[in-house]
Amino acid sequence: MPALPLLAAHAGLLLVFDLAHHLVLVLALLGAAFLWLPFAARRLEARPGAGRAILLGALLLRLTMLPLPPTLSDDALRYLWDGKVAAAGFNPYTLTPEASDLVPLRDGAWRRVPHPEIPTVYPPLAVAAFSITSRFPFPLLAWKALATGADLAACALLLALARRLGVPEGRVVWYAWNPLPVLEVAGMGHVDVLGVAAVLAAVLALTRRDDGGRTGNAVQAAVCAAAGVLAKLVPLVALPMWARLSRRPWRFLGAALGLVAAAVLPVLAATGGIPPGLVRYGVSWEFNGPLYEPLWRLLDAAGTAPWIAGRLEANEEATRQFYRWDAVYPYLYPQLLAKLLLAAGIGTAAVLSLRERDPAAGTGRLFGRLMLLSATVYPWYLLWVLPWAALLGWRAWRALSALILLSYLVLAGLPLLPWIHLAIWGPFAVLLAFERGERWRPTG
């Protein structure tokens, strides 16, 4: 069976158990698994009807990871705390884990909850899932099992999408057997997979043809898209593109935005606006952003923030309104200016996506651009792009699924910049440029 070498590598991770304290060995085992992946994909692409074998391999690989403790990321501990708070009838959007009202809920795991000074940043559907699993006798295992179930559903949806688009089912191995999603979902228990599965279901609905030859099911796609947004906010940017591709844009937007509003408006009312945890994330979080890191350093070296402050002061002098811009000055620093520029880039990407004609390729391109424009790119964020890279044969993104694991070296005390950052994004940029060149190369 082509999955056996991958199973052996993952079994090695199970023997290591505490991955954070054996990073070199962990990366070596994962590297060996990645080296085998192209051979497995090539064999399965040549085999008709490989879907069952792919799903069986995906299940076995994930089962080996379920017993692992989430040592590479403590996000799952935060998920369960937020779920416990919600299950007890408190509001995790207004109360931080440090809040005195929540003292009766504290247990032995409370001290390991990350960012206890910040309320939750997760949307309502995710918090509901956390709340359900927090009630089980073994909540961490219950949560990881739920996330793994969603990941297997994503594999099945990707196979269905491959059949509908007429591409070899074996390509799905680049997601289903890829060590990155296996590690990040079954191993570390990241919530992103709930949104990824919902997005795959939405795109599958958009590509469906009925008996009359018409493409798409707007309401079904809208329900799945809303579920994706309510699991994690990433798909929100794709709603205009999907609405256009649904051929029933107002019906799609009405259903999707109606469902999102019904879940989100009570949160906004409780917090008096954008939830403070989400604001804190947008303003303060940064890690491994491929464009963000060089951009803010360039703005800093160019003295952009002092230059803007000087222009505002000159305007105050000219207009004799000396307190007009006082509220702006605290935000004039290069990191925030870079994030504002990248946010403008995300808006541009959303507008450009309206030109897309293929739901699968358009979704992949849009999510890829969002990742490149993000100030924070953790390894599990690649789950949003990897299904489309697998399906459409994007070599640069498939390679990135291996390279991005190098960012875990920061857990060993190594600085992310410059060498780890370059080791991740340098080869990716070269491969991406090569693929773009191939695409535009004349064929005659």
Image (cartoon, grey):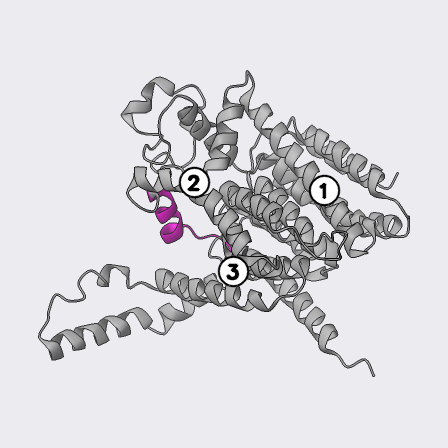
Q: Amino acid at mark 1?
A: Cys
Residue at 27% x, 74% y is: 307
- Magenta stretch, main secondary structure class: helix
Report how far apart the C-alphas of labels 2 and 3 lie in the structure: 45 Å
Disc 1 to disc 2, how far (Cα)? 29 Å
Q: Nearer the viewer, residue 302 or 90?
A: 90
Amino acid beneath label 3: Pro
Can you tell which quarter of the image residue 343 is in? bottom left
Q: Nearer the viewer, mark 2 or mark 3?
A: 2
Q: Was residue 263 drawn as part of the magenta stretch in this picture?
A: no
Please indicate, yes or no, whether residue 178 appears anywhere in the rendered image: no
Span colored in magenta: 276-288
* Residue 399 visible at all: yes
Which is nearer the N-term, disc 2 or disc 3?
2
In the rendered image, residue 196, in percent from the top left (x then y), is placed at: 61, 45
Above or below — where is 88 with respect to 371?
above
At mark 3, the secondary structure is: helix
Q: Which residue is mark 2?
A: 262
Pick the front one: 5 or 278: 278
**Which of pointers 1 and 2 lies earlier in the amino acid sequence?**
1
Q: Earlier in the sequence, mark 1 or mark 3?
A: 1
User: Residue 418 shows which numbered tag?
Assistant: 3
Residue found 80% across the figure and 47% down from its top: 36
Mark 2 is on which residue type? Ala
Q: What is the crowding at mark 3: few (fewer than 14 residues within 10 Å), some, or many (at least 20)?
A: few
